[in-house]
Image (tube, grey):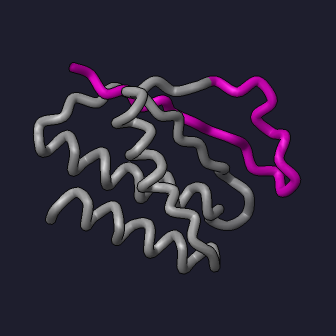
Amino acid sequence: MDLQEAIEREDSKINKLCGWETNDIAGYYSELQKYGLVEVGWRESCGATDKTHVAYRSWRKIITLMTKSGAVITEQRVKHGNAYASNKGGFWQSIIFRREG
């Protein structure tokens, strides 16, 4: 599958879930290409799968496709000091994805 088609497919899924056009995946990809890195965050353990976690899972699929095609992507987990600050009790996670070379 073509990378651009995969990005559009994943964005379409997220847009339907959210009820509006977020195009998160295209935005993440664009930022990675423009700046060489992108931070992707999501909320976990909030009683149900949060929309931000769905977007993160979709982004992982794109990263997998990129690495299979030869891209070198490194990941750096970000530590958040107030991890339990969300209203529903979930905690925030994020990873900085960096394109090497």
Of residues 94 and 19, the one drawn nearer to the viewer in this rendering: 19
**Magenta span includes 74:** no
- Quadrant position of residue 46: bottom right
The answer to whether 90 appears left or right of 41 in the picture is right
Please identify the residue farthest to the front as the structure is shown: 34
- Quadrant position of residue 26: bottom left
Please identify the residue farthest to the top as the structure is shown: 101
Residue at image location 81% in from the left, 30% down from the top: 82
Residue at image location 30% in from the left, 45% down from the top: 63
Q: Can you say which quadrant of the picture contains the C terminus?
A: top left
Decide: is 28 above or below 55.
above
Q: What percent of the width, then of the height, locates residue 22?
A: 57, 64
Q: What percent of the width, then of the height, locates residue 43?
A: 66, 50
Of residues 90 and 8, the one drawn nearer to the viewer in this rendering: 8
Of residues 96 and 37, the one drawn nearer to the viewer in this rendering: 37
Residue at image location 26% in from the left, 60% down from the top: 4
Q: Can you say which quadrant of the picture contains the N terminus?
A: bottom left
Q: What percent of the width, then of the height, locates residue 48?
A: 67, 67
Residue at image location 47% in from the left, 34% down from the top: 38
Of residues 30 and 69, the one drawn nearer to the viewer in this rendering: 30
Q: What percent of the width, then of the height, locates residue 97?
A: 41, 31
Decide: is 9 above or below 101.
below
Count of numbered badges drawn on the protein: 0
**Magenta span includes 89:** yes
Q: Which residues are magenta?
A: 79-101
The answer to whether 52 appears left or right of 96 in the picture is right
